[in-house]
Image: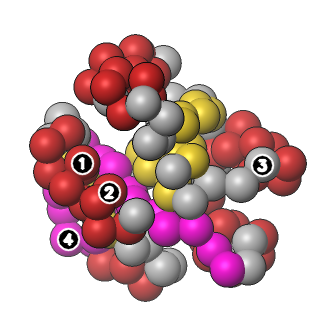
């Protein structure tokens, strides 16, 4: 499964690579990382992803703006998109759902829960 992780915090790449070491090694998941919404759109212009995990609060293009581009403008059929935020507030959740988010995770990411959710997508 190809997964694009979008987050302006660069240490997220190391964290995902550590937590998914076994899955990366056995080839069941492949990760790509983008550190802004703009970078994610550029990546998706030439690559596909089955799942996109995107932070909501990023400088420049927010995760919600990226979600809108992905779900409504870019890809048909659109990939599964899970929004990640440090703020579990109802407004972001509602907006993300309205824009077509498939799921919603809070930081710090519960990797056990995320792995269970990935099994449902597969």
Give x and y (percent) for residue 49.
62, 54
Which marked residue is nearer to the observer: mark 4 or mark 1?
1
Q: Is residue 26 above or below residue 99?
A: above
Image marks 4 and 1: residues in contact by CB distance under 8 Å = no
Residue at the spot of label 4: 90
Which region of the structure is painted magenta?
A: 77-93
Q: How is the image coloured?
A: secondary structure
Residue at the spot of label 2: 118
C-alpha span from label 3 to label 2: 20 Å
Callout 2: few (<14), some (14-19), or many (20+) C-alpha neighbours within 10 Å? some
Nearer the N terminus, badge 4 or badge 1? Answer: 4
C-alpha span from label 3 to label 4: 32 Å
Residue at the spot of label 1: 115
Image marks 2 and 4: residues in contact by CB distance under 8 Å = no
- Whether residue 88 appears in magenta in the rendering, the answer is yes
Residue at the spot of label 3: 47
Question: Residue 60: in sight, yes or no?
Answer: no
Which marked residue is nearer to the observer: mark 3 or mark 4?
3
C-alpha span from label 1 to label 2: 5 Å
Q: Quadrant of residue 11?
A: top left
Nearer the N terminus, badge 1 or badge 3? Answer: 3
């Amino acid at each position: 499964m190809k997964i694009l992780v979008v987050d302006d915090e660069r240490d997220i790449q190391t964290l995902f690579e550590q937590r998914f070491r076994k899955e990366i090694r056995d080839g069941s998941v492949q990760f790509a990382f983008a550190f802004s919404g703009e970078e994610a759109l550029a990546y998706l212009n030439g690559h596909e992803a089955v799942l996109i995990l995107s932070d909501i609060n990023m400088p420049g293009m927010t995760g919600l703006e990226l979600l809108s581009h992905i779900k409504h403008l870019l890809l048909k059929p659109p990939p599964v998109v899970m929004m990640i935020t440090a703020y579990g507030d109802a407004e972001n959740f509602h907006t993300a759902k309205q824009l077509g988010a498939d799921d919603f995770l809070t930081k710090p990411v519960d990797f056990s829960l995320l792995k269970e959710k990935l099994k449902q997508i597969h």
